[in-house]
Image: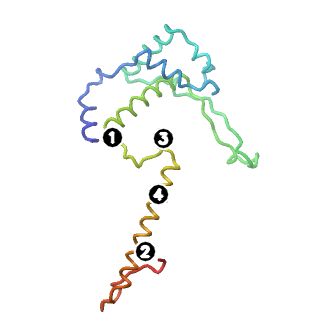
Amino acid sequence: MVDVALKYYFLTSASECQLTTPDDVHEAIRGLKVSKSPGPNGVPNRAVNHLHKRSVSLIAHVLNAVLRTHHFPQAWKNARVITILTSAREPTLSSSYRPISFFEEFGKIFEMILLARNLHVVSKWRLIRDEQFGFRPRHITSLQLTRLVERITRNFVEKCSQAHFSSTLPKPSIPFASMASSTC
């Protein structure tokens, strides 16, 4: 499947990229959390959420220019970095702090649109195994832990039953042939 997806990708010309629509931009803007702090330009997400349709359309044109030129603006790569003291740590140690980066809203919007497209392709072509749980919707960690415990329990029970079965057989004359576990 990966080979097919890569072949499809390389056969598609860069000039034939899927352009961004104002609806894509509007959907990404709705995904911005209004409680988050603004990036280096100081524009809060709450203000971006209230943009007029014409402004959203202009953002779509800018994002399409980024797609056509394959150039991600340097300003969107810059971040405002602050440090936060982690709980119950010594404030005089630098290791007690963790950095938080605030990026430009328009770069985040562009990345959200690309992420949605990539996730669609990944799910369509089944490029990620179902056992992969990190950062996937409807794949929470507790379910994976449940699957893991179930698999370990099942293997342990099977191993114990095999060990019990092998211990009832006559002992072979070859040393080390019977490797039954003593934990069962």
Q: Amino acid at mark 2?
A: Cys
Q: How many angstroms separate mark 2 from mark 1 (CA)? A: 36 Å
Mark 1 and mark 2 in contact (Cβ < 8 Å)? no
Going from the N terminus, do you reach mark 1 or mark 3 first? 1
Q: Amino acid at mark 4?
A: Leu
Q: Which quarter of the image is occupied by the N terminus?
A: top left
The answer to whether residue 110 is left or right of residue 129 is right
- Check disc 3 and report its element: helix, strand or loop: loop
Residue at numbered disc 2: 160
Tell me residue 157's x, y (percent). 43, 69
Q: Which of the 4 quarters of the picture holds residue 16?
A: top left
Residue at numbered disc 1: 126
Q: Amino acid at mark 3?
A: Phe
Tell me residue 105's x, y (percent). 55, 23
Viewer-nearest of discs 4 and 1: 4
Q: Nearer the viewer, residue 20 or 39?
A: 20
Viewer-nearest of discs 4 and 2: 2
Few, some or many residues within 10 Å of mark 3 (<14, 14–19, 20+):
few
Residue at numbered disc 4: 148
Q: How many angstroms separate mark 4 from mark 2 (CA)? A: 18 Å
